[in-house]
Amino acid sequence: MGAICGIINENQKIDTLLLSRMLKTISHRGNREEKVFVKENIGLGYKDFKLSNSDSTDQCISNEDNTIFLVCDGNIYNYKDLKITLQKKGHRFKSSSDKEVIIHLYEEKGVKLLNDLRGVFSFGLWDNRNKELFLARDRVGKKPLVYSDTSCGIIFASEIKSLLLHPEMKKEIDLHSLDLFITYQAVPSPKTIFKGIKKLPPAHYLLWKNNNLKIKKYWDIDYTKKLILKNEDEYSQLLWANLVDSTKICISDDTSFGVFLSGGLDSTVIAGIVNQLSPNKIKTFSVGFEEEEFNELKYASLVGSFFGSEHYEFIVKPDIMKILPKLLWHYNEPFADSSMLATYCLAYETKKSVEIIFNGDGGDETLAGYTRYWQTLMLEKISKLMKVLPSGIKEKFINSFIKVCEKNPSSSFFKVGKWLYELEKNGYGHAYGRTLTAFASEYKERLYSPMIKNALKDFDPFHLLKTLWTQAGNISLLEKILYTDQHLYLPEVLSVKMDVATMSNTLETVSPFLDHKFIELMASFPPNLKLKKNTTKYILKKKVGGFIPKEIIYRKKMGFGVPLGKWFKGELKDYISSYLLSDKFDKRGFFNNLEVRKMVQEHISGKALHTSRLWSLLVFELWYRVFIEGESL
């Protein structure tokens, strides 16, 4: 892991003090000494992450003749094999660092080196011979990388707050990005909340030379190439062999590691594999709540006992909100997945015991684990049945159905009606997108101020989703949904949440389900092996019988949520009112304050449930105070 930053000027010398400040502000991402390299108009900075029992030397930053320089955040899991191959070709290594293989691969293959890397990474490489900067990010977006094309050259870093120190960077909010945040809970790549700063998207690289910038995608998930095997047993055996390999390649004998255990299927499977591969007793870590409907600790405890792990549990209470301003400082942008609180708390406590943590992230998106997947396929069947109706009668039926259900907008029937309406009006891509949003179009119409509405009049936040839907190609509806989530929800929400939670606590995380080799294999499986009728992750469940407790395999899917709705009505009602009903909030000019006041009052009184909407607004308000107004943490 680690922190990286860089300044490449076209004709000016590097401000070494500025470069050092840029690195220092993200120094929580590493645990070694901060290192800065400056040569004329090139400045690179890094702070590496060293495991306590590792004998690896400090990150190598150059090749043998000092013509290529590298800073890298991440891990290259197949570096040993790559290193042997490169040594046979005559390359001499200065260190035992896994990252040094990138330099020598670049000498051999240029940007095509990315095809050989198996791991999580973001890096900046300066080629002094060609006077060219090469930035790249891993395939699934586990490690972040942001940049800005300035008047003098280009700057990049692991986090936005580092770039904001540059004198050319202004803290000016991109209103299109604000709308994207309100829509998707986060600001998707390539945008950031700030004008002038962009994210390098996952599976992309950037080349900069002579103030010319080129960005290109180097990898994608292909659902069109199907693997044909004899029977389900052969598929399940192949799945298992690859998942074990994706886990094994990340295990080091000389480091302390554990597993985040939610009590769900994916983390339990990973815990079982790690337990099988580890020579020592494993440690497992779980977080829960006093509110029973949100608490999965009994399942996590069951798994811990089943594997005989050294199990740790932590309870999150409403007072966790006091860390929210600090947490948003780590996020750099508004971010509204409420489980960020619990994940951060879990990482904070886990760091006291281990240095590397495994998790089950990616299992839902690769093996069709979310309830919304089978619900969407069910609605597809309803839609097909309705096609026999004349369009006028069909529209009248949908509108009448919605009107009847409007008295209870949180009901499943209301959601069915709105989904069918969106499907008829805008197609499957837009209809599925509705399931990902807290603020549907009708809410945003009431929420935004006239100023914001005017700024957004020609902007469609669903254009991104529609593009992904088209980009997925001619594949099944389920695979289109998986492709969309793998390019939007997974990298822009889940991966960001895990990176921030762990790196802010200098904890290294591993997600075997997100190994690109495993993702490619699962894309080649027939869709009905992932979702069979309403059985999610069918082929995985078929394989793990007897390997993990049966109670985990067949338990009802439970999302990793935080009981904010209850807290907002009780312990935190004054807290949320103090921010969203404040004079400061009223004067910002972003939102219709009467509508916000109505939502707060309706939620506290129990008249309506606005949990995710109020959370998004609260997060934005606190983020604004920290980043724009500079309030102390």
Image: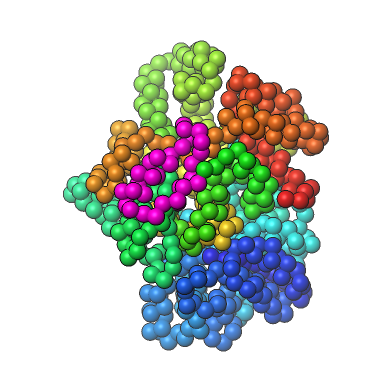
Q: In the displayed orientation, state which residue is furthest to the left.
A: 230
Q: Is residue 298 magenta?
A: yes
Which residue occupies 31% across, 39% down?
551
Q: Answer whether residue 36 is visible to the viewer in this image.
A: yes
* Vertical side of 159 occupied by 545: above or below: above
Q: Nearer the viewer, residue 48 or 268?
A: 268
Which residue occupies 45% across, 51% down?
312
Q: Nearer the viewer, residue 1 or 262?
A: 262
Instruction: Please count the marks in the image.
Output: 0
Q: Is residue 613 left or right of residue 363?
A: right
Q: Nearer the viewer, residue 293 or 201?
A: 293
Which residue occupies 56% across, 50% down?
344
Q: Nearer the viewer, residue 59 or 214?
A: 59
* Vertical side of 223 occupied by 559: above or below: above
Colouring chosen for the image of the structure: rainbow
* Vertical side of 91 occupied by 538: above or below: above
Q: Is residue 485 left or right of residue 522?
A: right
* Residue 165 pos. (x, y %): 75, 61
Q: Answer whether residue 522 is visible to the viewer in this image.
A: no
* Residue 160 pos. (x, y %): 67, 56
Q: Is residue 355 magenta?
A: no
* Magenta extent: 285-314
Which residue occupies 75% across, 62% down?
166
* Residue 608 pos. (x, y %): 59, 21
Can you tell which quarter of the image residue 567 is in?
A: top right
